[in-house]
Amino acid sequence: MLFLAKSLLFSQKFDTQKNINYCAEQAQKTINTLPKDGKPNIPRSINNNSKDWRLVNYEDWCSGFWSGSLWYLYEGTKKPFFKQQAELFDKQLLPLSQQKVAHDHDLGFQIFCSYGNGYRLTKNPAYKKVILKTADILATLYNPKVGTILSWPREVAKFKAHNTIIDNMINLELLFWASKNGGNKNLYKIAEKHALTTMENHFRDDFTSYHVVLYDTLTGKKLKGMTHQGYADNTMWARGQAWAIYGFTMCYKETKNPKFLDFAQKVTDVYLKNLPDESLIPYWDFNTPEIPNTTRDASAACVTASALLDLSKMVKDSKKASLYYAKATKMLASLSSKEYQSRGENDAFLLHSTGNRPINGEIDASIIYADYYYIEALTRLKNYHK
């Protein structure tokens, strides 16, 4: 009862609908500026001190976040305009469902964030067909000797190994969904095995995550853990840990396997324990020696906030549930402040995300996946007590 009272009190103080409406206004501004003819025209990021979106085509791993955000805006505002726009951008992603073998592991991000939300809200059978076809394509990257889906097929020659990145946990939702909605039942086994293998090999003793794990392609033996976007191989890259929180929370929701619920709490607790201050917005890597003279990563906070709203409903301990809810809502309050909302700076929803700092890519930028998980978290908060 106390947890319910606290959550209701926050919802009265924090105007969720106001922030959804703000996102709708920003999206409308973006739509007004996008090219009407020719491609690319899918928003990806806006550099610091710029007002112009970097635009990509359907092949970019971020291509599904824009239409996914539009679907959430349709859900949050009930305006048919956002449905129409989402459908237009979804059409551009169709070639992804027509591959024979997956060119990349990010089909879950690309198709389930877009077509998945579209089907959830419309039940359009054409959308379901695309989702099921894409799930089968993603499964072509599964290596049964290793027990995981291959990430970055283009990097196999470079690594001389089967590589799996923590981000790939999010793509499993596509497989779980397909297996339960008319697709191949084996997709469920692939997704569950990938999660179990990742749980065993991808984490240090303190439950912080490696970004990349390399496996021997033939034997399946773990070779080493390393990073690509973190500060160092042994540091906690903020967004990578957020992917772990979100991914294992989702796996429990899909399987009800208590191992996943327990593990989701372990990877969450080390993240929350090490947050730098009351804003709850992490620096891009928790262990970079550059702190505090370095950039934050709002995108990691968005992913975590969205996951924690789900996780708070799943845990059996009421104190834990209350803690996770409180942290999620505090993150959303910080993200919705003038410090993090883009407002007049540009047409994105949020500022201050860090994409790939080691290669100086998208630093202190507005990035579409931050916007996507922000609007998803706002939607989950709005629907929390339904």
Image (spheres, rainbow, N blue to C red):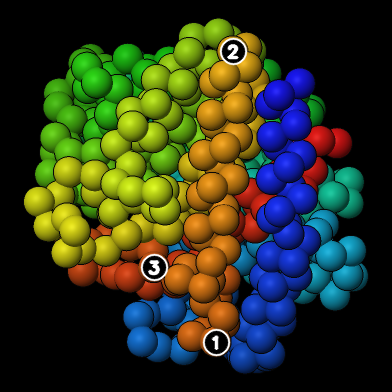
In what quadrant of the picture does the C terminus appear? top right
Q: Where does the image place residue 229, in percent across and percent down from the top left? A: 24, 51
In which image quadrant can residue 8 be found?
A: top right
Q: How many marks?
A: 3
Residue 227 — which label?
Answer: none
Q: Neighbour class for label 2 at 10 Å: few (<14), some, many (≥20)?
A: few
**Marks 1/2: CA–CA distance:** 42 Å
Taking 207 as reference, is 14 left or right? right
Residue in view at x 62 percent, y 91 percent: 33
Residues at marks 2 and 3, CA–CA distance in whole angstroms? 34 Å
Q: Residue at x 63, y 49 (%)?
A: 377
Residue of label 3: 352
Q: Sequence order check: which comes first, mark 1 or mark 2?
A: 2
Compare residues 121 and 263 and report the one nearer the observer. Answer: 263
Q: Is residue 200 left or right of residue 235?
A: right
**Residue, x 40% and y 88% (percent of image)?**
50
Q: Which residue is mark 1?
A: 344
Give the answer, above or below, for where 221 lies relative to 237.
above
State the residue position of label 2.
317
Disc 1 element: loop
Query: Does residue 117 appear in this view?
Result: no
